[in-house]
Image (spheres, rainbow, N blue to C red):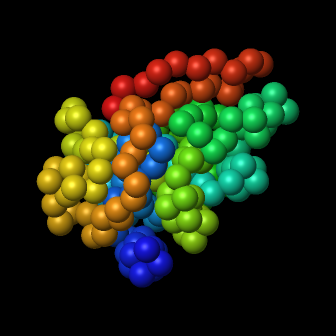
C-alpha cells in the first residue's frame, strides 16, 4: 500500500485527481489548494462550479487554521471525528485566501471531513487538505469501490487506491456548526 500511496501523493502534488476509499463512499481527491486541480475535478464530475466541494483533513487539529468556530463546534468535532460527518463551518480568512474557489467561495460555509479511514487520512496528512467528494458524475449513483469508480470515470482519474470494502455505502451526514447548536441532516450522493 505504501507504493500506491506514494503514487497517489505524487499525482496530487502535480495537480491530478486520485480516487480513494473513505468510511462512507469512494471519494475523489485533489489538493484543496490547487485551483486547477479542483476545477478539473469539478469538470470530471460534471458539476456546476457554483456547487461547493467539501474537503478532508487528517485530524481535528488540522481543521483549526481553516475555520472560525465556537467552542461548542470544536467540542462536537472532538467528540465525533473521525467519522461519517461533513461539518459545515465558517471559513477563516486563511481558507478564503489559500483554498480553491470551488471549496470556499461557492458557498458561505466550508464543508469539512475527517473520514474514519486510514487511507483517506494518510492522503490528507501527506498533502494537506484534499477534496472530499463522491466518485461519480453529477447525478449518477456514487461509487463504493475503486472498481465502480474506474468504470464510471476511467482515465480521468490518475490513481485509484483500493481499500477494505466501504462499510456504509451512504453519504456523510451534514452537521451545521455555524449556529449556537449543531444541526444535522442526512445528505444525498
Query: Going 62% across and 25% down the picture, which residue do you hit?
Result: 176
- In the picture, residue 150 is in which quadrant? bottom left
Q: Position of residue 159 (x, y in %)?
A: 31, 69
Image label count: 0
Where does the N terminus fall, quadrant-wise? bottom left
Asked if one can make out residue 69 in the rendered structure from this viewpoint, the answer is no
Q: Position of residue 108 (x, y in %)?
A: 56, 32
Where does the C terminus fall, quadrant-wise? top left
- In the picture, residue 126 is in which quadrant? bottom right
Query: Going 28% across and 39% down the picture, which residue do you hit?
Result: 142
Residue in front for this viewpoint, 145 or 131 = 145
Q: Position of residue 168 (x, y in %)?
A: 42, 35
Is 15 above or below relative to 93? below
72 on left or right of 169: right
Q: Position of residue 58 (x, y in %)?
A: 63, 57
Residue furthest right in the image: 71
76 on left or right of 88: right
81 on left or right of 13: right
Asked if one can make out residue 41 in the rendered structure from this viewpoint, the answer is yes
Query: Going 51% across and 28% down the picture, which residue do you hit?
Result: 173
Query: Going 76% across and 40% down the picture, which residue do you hit?
Result: 78
Is 54 above or below relative to 164? above
Amino acid at each position: 500500500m505504501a507504493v500506491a500511496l506514494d503514487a497517489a501523493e505524487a499525482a496530487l502534488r502535480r495537480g491530478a485527481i486520485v480516487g480513494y476509499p473513505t468510511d462512507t463512499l469512494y471519494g475523489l481527491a485533489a489538493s484543496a489548494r490547487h485551483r486547477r486541480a479542483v476545477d478539473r475535478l469539478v469538470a470530471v464530475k460534471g458539476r456546476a462550479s457554483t456547487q461547493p466541494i467539501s474537503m478532508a483533513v487528517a485530524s481535528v487539529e488540522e481543521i483549526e487554521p481553516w475555520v472560525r468556530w465556537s467552542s461548542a463546534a470544536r467540542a462536537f468535532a472532538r467528540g465525533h471525528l473521525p467519522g461519517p460527518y461533513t461539518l459545515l463551518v465558517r471559513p477563516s480568512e486563511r481558507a478564503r485566501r489559500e483554498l480553491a474557489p470551488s471549496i470556499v467561495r461557492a458557498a458561505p460555509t466550508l464543508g469539512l471531513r475527517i473520514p474514519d479511514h486510514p487511507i483517506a487520512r494518510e492522503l490528507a496528512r501527506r498533502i494537506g487538505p484534499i477534496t472530499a467528494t463522491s466518485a461519480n458524475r453529477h447525478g449518477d449513483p456514487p461509487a463504493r469501490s475503486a472498481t465502480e469508480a474506474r468504470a464510471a470515470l476511467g482515465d480521468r482519474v490518475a490513481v485509484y487506491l483500493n481499500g477494505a470494502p466501504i462499510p456504509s455505502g451512504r453519504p456523510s451526514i451534514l452537521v451545521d456548526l455555524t449556529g449556537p447548536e449543531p444541526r444535522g441532516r442526512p445528505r444525498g450522493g
